[in-house]
Image (tube, rainbow, N blue to C red):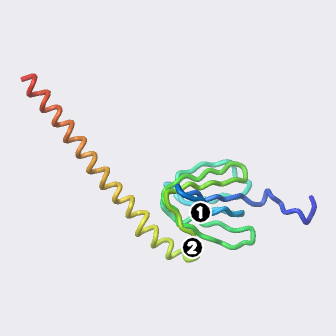
Amino acid sequence: MNPDTPDTSAFMNLRLLLPTRILLEQATTKIIAEADNGEFCLLPRHVDFVAALVPGVLSFFTTDGEERFAAVDRGILVKCGRDVAVSAYQGVIGDDIGELQTLIDEQFLQLDESERKARTALARLEAGTLRGFLDLREQFRG
């Protein structure tokens, strides 16, 4: 191998995709993300991999060795060969991990709480509707 030619097997192509745009395209040597069962690390020669991400901080190392961060909402990470795609509902690139964690706590997790409340209300509405149909059925039978 020519010493002037970069070793392409030593990095991954990270793409962070949001519903409306591509937030990031970056060559990286290491990616750390968080799934339901905890944090995990991907390196260039890692096997192909798919994970459902939870709201958290995604950290990655550039080919220059600089660690960078992104706050990501729920999403999916797919590693196929050297390509790693992260598709998330929301995402923000930042340098301060504390600010990113605050953003996650205040915005991404708050949205999850609102969604949980909406689903609970919907479940109650469905249960009430079913009870109403059962009451009607009993009235016509009796």
Quadrant of the drawing holding the C terminus:
top left
Mark 1 or 2, nearer chain start: 1
Label 2 is placed on what type of residue?
Gly
In this picture, is 4 found above or below 37?
below
In this picture, is 136 found above or below 51?
above
Name the residue rendered at 49%, 54% in the picture: 36
For label 2, the crowd category at 10 Å Cα-Cα, with few meaning under 14, some 14 to 19 and many 20 or more, is some
Left/right of residue 101 with respect to residue 11 in the rendered view: left
Cα–Cα gap, marks 1 and 2 = 12 Å
**Residue occupying the far front of the picture:** 20
Give the structural element (helix, strand or loop) at label 2: strand
Give the structural element (helix, strand or loop) at label 1: strand
Quarter-of-image position of residue 61: bottom right
Which residue is tagged 1?
A: 23
Indicate the position of residue 57 as horizontal and vertical percent values. Answer: 54, 66
Name the residue rendered at 72%, 72% in the picture: 65
**Residue occupying the far left of the picture:** 142
Indicate the position of residue 72 as horizontal and vertical percent values. Answer: 52, 62
Left/right of residue 55 with respect to residue 30 in the rendered view: left
Q: Which mark is residue 94?
A: 2
